[in-house]
Image (tube, coloured by chain):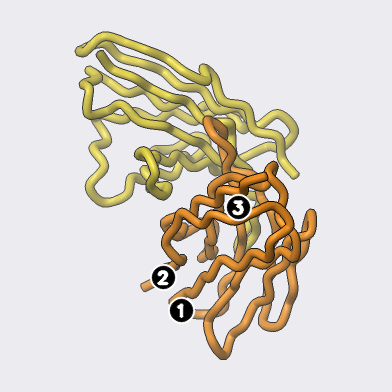
Chain colours: A yellow, B orange
């Protein structure tokens, strides 16, 4: 399967600052990547679909100006949490899918804590 | 719409006990079905999958059979180990997206 690397694995930032999370597909050219958010002891919530060379597609209720996604190459997507607030603290996970109705491969996740 | 329902946890078992985690789904069409496992502080790892009715996915002693008639994909393992303690997610695919169940915490005691 695909190898997906996320960086950083954890980050602590002050309220009002922005944080960038990188998701790299190390051995697979991904035209599409996915960003999820996971609250403690809860399931994954799909935030957006990152499309290489075009705008991301956001799920209903996700603020696109708050969570900026850039997918500039076939191996890298970034999620920037802008003007972070404590309620943005969460576990963010990216994934790469390898086609229709096939499995996804996940990064190790990024724990964001906003203080 | 598409949805996945898992049994609530946590499930607490003794080592070598038999494990069943129930999963049922609602879907339009014929999705592929997956079980993912998440260890503390980590991302998700694919445990097993099935792509059509009556398929059985298996890996590391875990098994699940795609039952179209009961829209189920229950996870089973004959003898659990402490190292199996984790959160288990059932999921289905539609197109290139995944829908996850709420997750079931499994705790195995020695």
How many C-alpha atoms fall within 10 Å of the one at disc 1: few (<14), some, or many (≥20)? few
Query: Which residue corresponds to mark 3?
Result: B36
Residues marked 2 and 3, same chain = yes
Quadrant into which the N terminus of chain B falls: bottom left
Q: Secondary structure at mark 2?
A: loop
Do marks 3 and 1 share a subunit?
yes
From the viewer's perspective, is B69 left or right of B49? left
- Name the residue carrying label 2: B2
Residues at discs 2 and 1 in contact (Cβ within 8 Å): yes
Chain to which the residue tagged by mark 3 belongs = B
User: Reading the chain from its start, which is encountered first: label 2 or label 3?
Assistant: 2
Give the residue number, with chain letter if any, for mark 1: B28
Q: Is residue A2 above or below residue B4?
A: above
Q: Position of residue A100 (x, y in %)?
A: 61, 61
Compute the Cα span from label 2 to label 1.
7 Å
Q: Is residue B40 above or below residue B85?
A: above
- Determine whether the residue tagged by mark 1 lies in a helix, strand or loop: loop
| Quadrant where the image shows the C terminus of chain B | top right
């Amino acid at each position: 399967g695909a190898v997906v690397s996320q960086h950083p694995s954890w980050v602590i930032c002050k309220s009002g600052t922005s944080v960038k999370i990188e998701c790299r597909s190390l051995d697979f050219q991904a035209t599409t990547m996915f960003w999820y958010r996971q609250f403690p002891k809860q399931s994954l919530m799909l935030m957006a679909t990152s499309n290489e060379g075009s705008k991301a597609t956001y799920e209903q209720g996700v603020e696109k100006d708050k969570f900026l996604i850039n997918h500039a190459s076939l191996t890298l997507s970034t999620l920037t949490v802008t003007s972070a607030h404590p309620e943005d603290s969460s576990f963010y996970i990216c994934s790469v899918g390898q086609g229709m109705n096939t499995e996804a491969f996940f990064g190790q996740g990024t724990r964001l804590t906003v203080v | 719409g598409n949805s996945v329902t898992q049994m609530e946890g946590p499930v607490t078992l003794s080592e070598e006990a038999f494990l069943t985690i129930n999963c049922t789904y609602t879907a339009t069409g014929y999705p592929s079905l997956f079980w993912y496992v998440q260890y503390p502080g980590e991302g998700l790892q694919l445990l097993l999958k099935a792509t059509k009715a009556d398929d059985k996915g298996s890996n590391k002693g875990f098994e699940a059979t795609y039952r179209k008639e009961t829209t189920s994909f229950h996870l089973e393992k004959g003898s659990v180990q402490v190292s199996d303690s984790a959160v288990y997610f059932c999921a289905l695919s539609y197109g290139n997206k995944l829908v996850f169940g709420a997750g079931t915490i499994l705790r195995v005691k020695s």
